[in-house]
Image: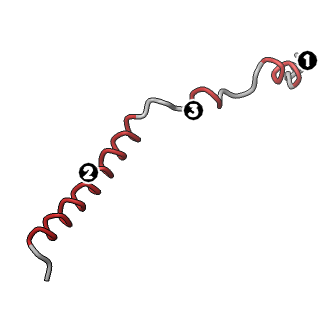
């Protein structure tokens, strides 16, 4: 059987692990860095010039 002091230390360690996990979760949720906003913008002007669609003749 654990002594009261040892059980309090175990409870304290468990509480520290839970609070650290919650802090990490909150930090990941609040992280403002969004790489998809900077690196996934789509084709640029050179791609559009190379793949330009020619208009079909009217009539």
Decide which of 29, 55 is in the foreground and name it: 29
Pinpoint residue 58: horizontal percent, then vertical percent.
88, 16
Residue 39 sits in quarter: top right
Residue 14: image location, x then y, percent:
24, 62
Please say if 18 is above or below 41. below
Total marks drawn? 3
Name of the residue lying farthest toward the left: 4
Q: Are marks 3 and 2 in contact (CB under 8 Å)?
A: no
Secondary structure under tag 2 reads: helix
Q: Nearer the viewer, residue 40 or 16?
A: 16
Q: Earlier in the sequence, mark 1 or mark 3?
A: 3
Quadrant assignment for the C terminus:
top right
Residue 52 position, x and y percent, is 85, 21
The earlier-in-sequence mark between 2 and 1 is 2
How far apart are the two marked residues, 1 and 3, measured between alpha carbons? 42 Å
- List the residue tagged with mark 2: 19
Position of residue 41 in the picture relative to residue 26 (left or right): right
Task: Report the Cα–Cα distance between label 2 and label 1.
Answer: 68 Å
The tag on residue 57 is 1
Q: Nearer the viewer, residue 44 or 33?
A: 33
Give yes or no for contact between labels 2 and 1 (Cβ–Cβ under 8 Å): no
Across and down, in percent, residue 57 comes to: 91, 17
On the picture, is 22 further left or further right than 48? left
* Label 1 element class: loop
- Tell me how the rendering is colored: secondary structure
Res 35 label: 3
């Amino acid at each position: 059987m654990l002594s009261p002091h040892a059980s309090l230390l175990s409870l304290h360690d468990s509480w520290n692990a839970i609070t650290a996990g919650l802090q990490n979760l909150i930090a990941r949720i609040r992280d403002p860095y969004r790489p998809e906003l900077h690196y996934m913008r789509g084709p640029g002007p050179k791609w559009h010039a190379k793949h330009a669609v020619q208009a079909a003749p009217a009539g």
